[in-house]
Amino acid sequence: MYFFSICQEVSVWPQPKPSKRPQHVRTIDPDKTWIAGLVGMLTRYRGLFSLFSGKLIFAAAALKWMNWHAALTIVLVGAGLIACLWITRIFFLRYIRCSERLHAICHEFRDELPNLTDVKASKRARGDALQRVLNEFVNQIAAIYRHQFADDSTRCALRLLDQSGENFTTVARSTGFEKSRKTNSEPVPVSAGLAKAIREKDAQGVFLIPDIPTAIEDEIWHPTKTDGLPDVKFLMVAPVNVVDRKQKQTVGILYVSSLKRRFSGPDTLSMKAFSDYLGTVLAVVADADSRMQKRGKAK
């Protein structure tokens, strides 16, 4: 392949002198990496306790040798510093854990891509690979938003267009949903509810749904048996689009739900990115399906 021939040419160029230190890829542990450096040292429980103890000692010394005004100032400044460090700890841990989950999504797609596009593999094998990818995708999306919002009630689900092209059916759900959803799930027709609303908006943007009953009244939600279940309240919904020969087609609907957080505009930015990334992967899979069909006809 051309890519490997380029690599071989580059390999004969003058190389830098090898380092005496061993070279390796470092694995990042989110639960340990954040404690590196001065800020990490201070934001650990040990560091926060040391700051608290030091604040009390200085406040007591100021009260004895100076006056109560100085002691109170030390207490207030120390409390403010500890609060800032605690907030830094929370947001830094959220950032690292969200980044770890984002890497997991890309890692899974990369590793499964050969299985998804192998035209020589059986249809069942390729279907199993796609199901694994989609299950991992919705679970990691849910985990990202759980860390970002500190909301354990966050869930994620995905509907894809069925073979008839008339309905969107649920193909993957993250953990945490009511178990009865699986048995009572109903398809959503392309001519009603969210599917229709998405088409009317040219399959762009993200829908913010404050609650399902309101969405039904506004005719942007197709009623189903599972609407009354208590595991979903607030929702973000994005279309999953693929582009084939410069024609955009909506092939899926991505849902993120919560019981606590009322989603807002800034929350939708990452949602758009996730749906676009999934659309790219599904376009590659669809292309492989087309090639496999042509291969079967040729035989």
Image (spheres, grey):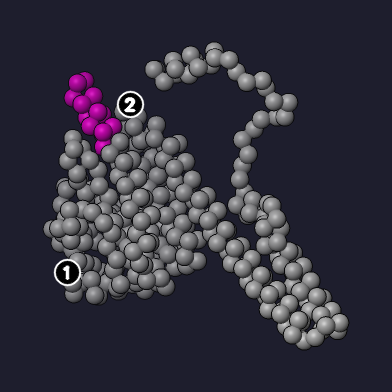
The residue sitting at 35% across, 35% down in the picture is: 116
Location of residue 208 in the rendering, given as x and y in whole percent from the top left corner: 29, 66
Location of residue 162 in the rendering, given as x and y in whole percent from the top left corner: 22, 49
Q: Which SS class for mark 2?
A: loop
In the orientation shown, which residue stands out farthest toward the right? 65
Q: Quadrant of residue 297?
A: top left
The residue sitting at 36% across, 56% down in the picture is: 269
Mark 2 / mark 1, whichever is N-terminal: 2
In the orientation shown, which residue stands out farthest toward the left? 191
Question: Is residue 293 located in the magenta-colored stretch of the structure?
Answer: yes
Question: Do we see residue 243 in this rendering?
Answer: yes
Q: Tell me the quarter of the image containing the C terminus.
A: top left
Question: In front here: 218 or 88?
Answer: 88
Question: Do we see residue 60 in this rendering?
Answer: no
Q: Quadrant of residue 229?
A: bottom left
The residue sitting at 31% across, 47% down in the picture is: 276
- Residue at mark 1: 219
- Residue at mark 2: 120
Above or below, comparing residue 105 to residue 199 in the picture: above
**How many residues crowd mark 1 within 10 Å: few (<14), some (14–19), many (20+)?**
some
